[in-house]
Amino acid sequence: MTRILILDGHPAKGSFCSALAERYLREAERAGHEVRSRHLSEMDFNPDYGTSDFDGGPQLEPDLENIWHDIVWCEHIVIVHPLWWGGHPAKLKGLFDRVLLSGKAFKYVPGKTIPEKLLKGRSAQVLVTADTPGWIFRWIYGSGIRKQTEKQILAFCGFKPKGYHVFSPIHGSNDTDREQMLTRAGQLALKAA
């Protein structure tokens, strides 16, 4: 059994990201994992870190405190989000900026270039919805957001990336296409541990 945190990183309710997150949750629970979920659309916080000083950042709002405790609790995190302008929605990026803090998620060590990873021992999967077909995302756009998410956010803090999965194209998809995508998300949950 693995402790799994699912973050539905779409800033609006009722999205296809929510449907993917729910299918993943259902299949993970059915496989015997202990699962918690959070929905970015239900979280209330200021996404602007607002200072250049790592030590003088704003106090975490209750929703950010709660997700931080879930991150510490989990052994595996699943982040589901839409691809907007080649990146994360602003509110999701703000969540990363506000929660994955120096001294909590990573720590600068004098004399070392790379910070110490304080969230080691955890793994991560990312599920991304996009209107961009997967081959264009990879071969023409170069998967920039994948590199940022896996290397400069998750691995930087100690998470071991265990898959980056693009569900596309959403625009123009029909019920059959979407059911296939939901089935795929459920199958990923069965391989989570």
Image: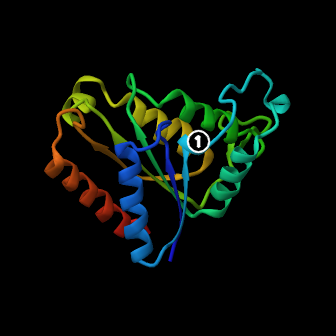
3 lies above or below 167: below
Residue at the image position 24 percent from the left and 52 percent from the top: 181
Q: Which of the image's four quarters has the C terminus? A: bottom left
Q: Splitting the image into 4 quarters, where does residue 162 fall? A: bottom left
| Residue 175: image location, x then y, percent | 17, 49
Q: Is residue 156 left or right of residue 87?
A: right
Q: Is residue 145 left or right of residue 35?
A: left
Query: Which residue lies most toward the front here?
Result: 14
Residue 112 visible here: yes
Residue at the image position 19 percent from the left and 55 percent from the top: 180
Q: Which of these two is toward me, 132 or 141?
A: 132
Q: Which of these two is toward me, 171 or 134?
A: 171
Q: For the residue labelled by badge 1, is the local secondary structure a helix, a strand or a loop?
A: helix
Q: Which residue is mark 1?
A: 156
| Residue 142: image location, x then y, percent | 31, 27
Disc 1 packing (10 Å; few <14; some 14–19; many ≥20): many
73 lies above or below 49: below
Residue at the image position 22 percent from the left and 32 percent from the top: 171
Q: Which of these two is toward me, 138 or 47?
A: 47
Residue 127 visible here: no
Q: Splitting the image into 4 quarters, where does residue 113 fall? A: top right
Residue at the image position 50 percent from the left and 77 percent from the top: 1
